[in-house]
Image (tube, grey):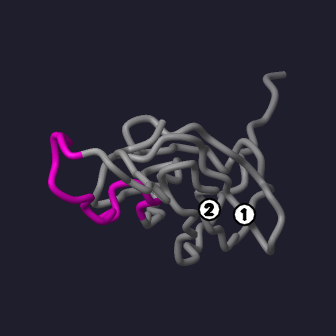
Amino acid sequence: MPLGWQIDDVAINGITNLPFDTFVADRGLCSTSSSTTEIHALGALLQATVSSTLATPNGAVEFFENGKTVGAAPLVNGVAAWNPATFLAPGTHTITASFGGTTNFTASTSAPATITIAAPTRRRAAR
C-alpha cells in the first residue's frame, strides 16, 4: 500500500480552473523508507527489532549463521523473537538478523551477535 500520492508526467493545457496552483514535488512520502535491524539476546530467545522513522515495518526476519538461514520469525509490532536452542547444536554461534524489506521499507541486517547454547542437562534414569 503506497504511503502517499505521486503525480508524474502530467501536462496541463487549456485548463484554467484547477483547484491547485502548481504540483508539489514528492518529498519522500511515495518512496521507500529506510529501516534498521538490531539483534539482542533476551533469555533463551534472540530478539530482532526492525525500526523506521516513518512507521513500524511488517513482514519477517531471517536469522543467519555463516551466511546460511538457521531460522525465521514474523515481525509483530516491529519485533521478531526466535529460540535458537530449538534449531542449533550446543556451542558458540554468531548470528545476524536480516529484514528482507517490503514495498515501503528497505532491507536491513543487524550487526552479528554471539550466543552460547548450553548442552542439555544429562539425567540418570531411575533404577
In the picture, residue 97 is in which quadrant? bottom right
Against 96, residue 117 (above or below) is: above
Q: What amino acid is found at the position of numbered circle 2 in the picture?
A: Ser
Left or right of 58 in this view: 6: left
Secondary structure at numbered mark 1: strand
| Image point (29%, 55%), residue name | 54
| Image point (72%, 63%), residue name | 64
Q: What amino acid is found at the position of numbered circle 1 in the picture?
A: Phe
Which residue does the numbered mark 1 point to in the structure image? 64
- Most foreground residue, 102 or 64: 102
Estimate the x, y position of residue 33 in percent, counting from the top left.
41, 61
| Image point (29%, 45%), residue name | 15
Residue 127: which disc? Answer: none
Left or right of 33 in this view: 118: right
| Image point (72%, 55%), residue name | 119
- Most foreground residue, 74 or 26: 26
- Most foreground residue, 6 or 105: 6
Which residue does the numbered mark 2 point to in the structure image? 98
**Span colored in magenta:** 16-33
